[in-house]
Amino acid sequence: MMFNPKLTALSAAILFSTLSACGGGGGGNDDNDNPPAPRQQLTALPAFLQGNEANCSFVESGNDVSLEAYSGNLNNVTGLTCNGVTLSDLNEISLLTALETLNLEDAGLTNVNELLNNSTLSELDLSGNPLTDLATIASLLNLTALDLDNTGLSDLTLLQSLTALQQLNLADNDISNVTALGNLMALTSLDLSGNSITELTSLGALTNLQTLDVSGNNSLACADINNLDNTLGGAVEITVPSDCTTALYLDNTSDASQTLDLSMQAIAFDRLVIGDIQGRDDIVLFQSGNDLRVTANTSAGEKQITFSNWFSDEAYQLGEFEIGSEGVSRFDDLRAAVGLGLALTDQDDTYSGSNGNDIIYGLDGNDIIAGERGADVIVGGSGSDILSGHKITIDDDSSVTRSVSYDSDQDTIVFNLGDGNDIIYEYEVTLSNRALLQFGTGIAPADITLYRNGLDLVFQINAEDSVTVFEWFKAGQYRIGQIQFGNNDPIAATEWVNAQPLSSNDITVTGTDASESLIGSTDDDIIYGLDGSDIITGGEGNDILSGYRIIVGEDNSVTRYPSYDNDQDTFVFNPGDGNDIIYEYEVTFSNRALLQFGAGIAPADITLYRNGLDLVFQINAEDSVTIFEWFDDDQYRIGQ
């Protein structure tokens, strides 16, 4: 009988530790007399990590922990990752008694013998290390994920003991025989690309396999791959060597337009090679019903091919798309990179996009379109459409509930002449990711009249066309971020809107507890800001303004409420803004409002006079600002 000396030494060490805890080699003492000592807290880093603290990190309780000035407990470490280090050994790694995940890519290791006692390991990445000995790895029976990419392996015999493995990467080695892998029945993902494998028969036992990559094995017979696929019931996604694919070409020599039903081909195509393009940006994917149209912008103009019934069954699909120097992609990866255009119907459609970059055309009808995640392009088309770059829900009473978006992609909403009356519902937390509203050809800035409808902002193009941004005036998160006219550069939406006159009937604008910009219309408005540092611009008309809360009675009397907040409001008055009245009741002097006169109003233009208890700033015969009851109490005054 043969013994593994390393395992024997480990067993002896464990036995010695056990006997010591029991009071020596005898019968031991009563547990009540000698309770076990508490587990020692270890803080000193293992020897192999000392000097590499800047390039390595632990995982404790699911969180990344820096090794610089480390003060934690080594017994709590479940993960270790090192990047850009060269190691000669793993001395004292056994101190990490709870280690589950270890990533040591390209560390120069030739063996990992010190891992013998780390039996808790479940995920191990040793890719790029020139390993010469797999004996210790073969003893880590709890491994579920192992990466030995580019490690110089040729013999896999020792790996057949790792029956818990689910993910195994053996790419870019010198492997010719994979018989040992037939014992790894739990495998779901296996990468054997870039080797010298000659047969795959033993892999037919891997009934749980979901993905298999054997590309780059030029000695493999295509028939053997097909036999394996048949043995596994066609349920495995297999990436094969290029010699085993039948290519279809789309380039400058192709017909301008062609249609293909892949299920009807005598010799099935499984790869589309797209040539004579600069890259993926020259490719357009478009879904029409169940058909997929691929368009390439070549030196000879647009060339397109339509695959009939692509979206109805996998039998109508290609396996790969090869794009010049950018290599090979599967359809889902290409779709995520370039987006997928989709035309809805001429009826009233409801559609939610994918997590990729979608391009959605609503066509006719009153559509409800939500882009979901990704950088989506939404073209509502004619009709009164409800549009959102993220997720929305239409309630039973036809009200719309928005879901907040935290993604890092900017959506584009396109509006063209004749598109009807659309409403945009946005709830984008990050300012830089807020949507772009793109006006198509024939719509210039001068064609647009802005007006406020309650808390909504309306872009009125003509009698038939308008775009409403729902609750623009309630919070910045509900606004779009940019506006673009035709092919001109996008401009910041809020700045452009603030520079335009607003039209509406007399309105009441109520702020929130946030700091915001509140803008009136061309008529007589009532605007009050509540909490926050608000910027209030009444605009044209005779407006009633307040930085905090007021109530205007039916007799036009105004009741003020005292403000105790710590924010200073700003009232902006420009030439032509009419005769405004400011009602203030600010308890704290330092927080009293700022009255800002716009360009064209100088100190010499202002005449001050008292009207009862009010102070009037008279600019000219048409323009004035009145501070209500300035002379009654200084709490009613502005501060600056």
Image: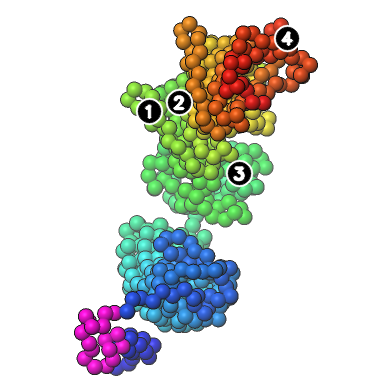
Question: Compared with residue 584, is residue 92 higher up or lower down, i.e. above or below?
Answer: below
Mark 3 lies on a secondary structure that is helix
Disc 4 + disc 3, Cβ < 8 Å: no
Question: Compared with residue 358, is residue 361 higher up or lower down, i.e. above or below?
Answer: above
Mark 1 or mark 3, whichever is nearer to me: 1
Which residue carries the number 2 mark?
386
Depth check: 353 or 28 in front? Answer: 28
Residues drawn in magenta? 20-36
Q: CA distance from mark 1 to mark 4?
A: 51 Å
Disc 2 + disc 1, Cβ < 8 Å: yes
- Magenta stretch encompasses residue 32: yes
Disc 2 + disc 4, Cβ < 8 Å: no
Disc 3 + disc 2, Cβ < 8 Å: no
Q: Residue at x 40, y 81 (%)?
A: 116
State whether the magenta stretch is mostly helix, strand or loop. Answer: loop
Depth check: 556 or 329 in front? Answer: 556
Q: Is residue 400 left or right of residue 569?
A: left
Question: Three-letter amino acid code at disc 3?
Answer: Asp
Mark 2 lies on a secondary structure that is strand
Image quarter (top left, top right, bottom left or bottom right) of the N terminus: bottom left
Residue 394: mark:
1
Characterize the local packing of mark 3: few (<14), some (14-19) or many (20 or more) Cα atoms within 10 angstroms.
few
Question: Three-letter amino acid code at disc 4?
Answer: Asn
Q: Does label 2 or label 4 sit earlier along the sequence?
A: 2
Mark 3 or mark 2, whichever is nearer to me: 2
Coloring scheme used? rainbow
Q: Does label 3 or label 2 sit earlier along the sequence?
A: 3
Q: Which corner quadrant of the image does residue 165 belong to?
A: bottom left
Q: CA distance from mark 2 to mark 1?
A: 10 Å
Which residue carries the number 4 mark?
620
Q: Residue at x 42, y 60 (%)?
A: 62
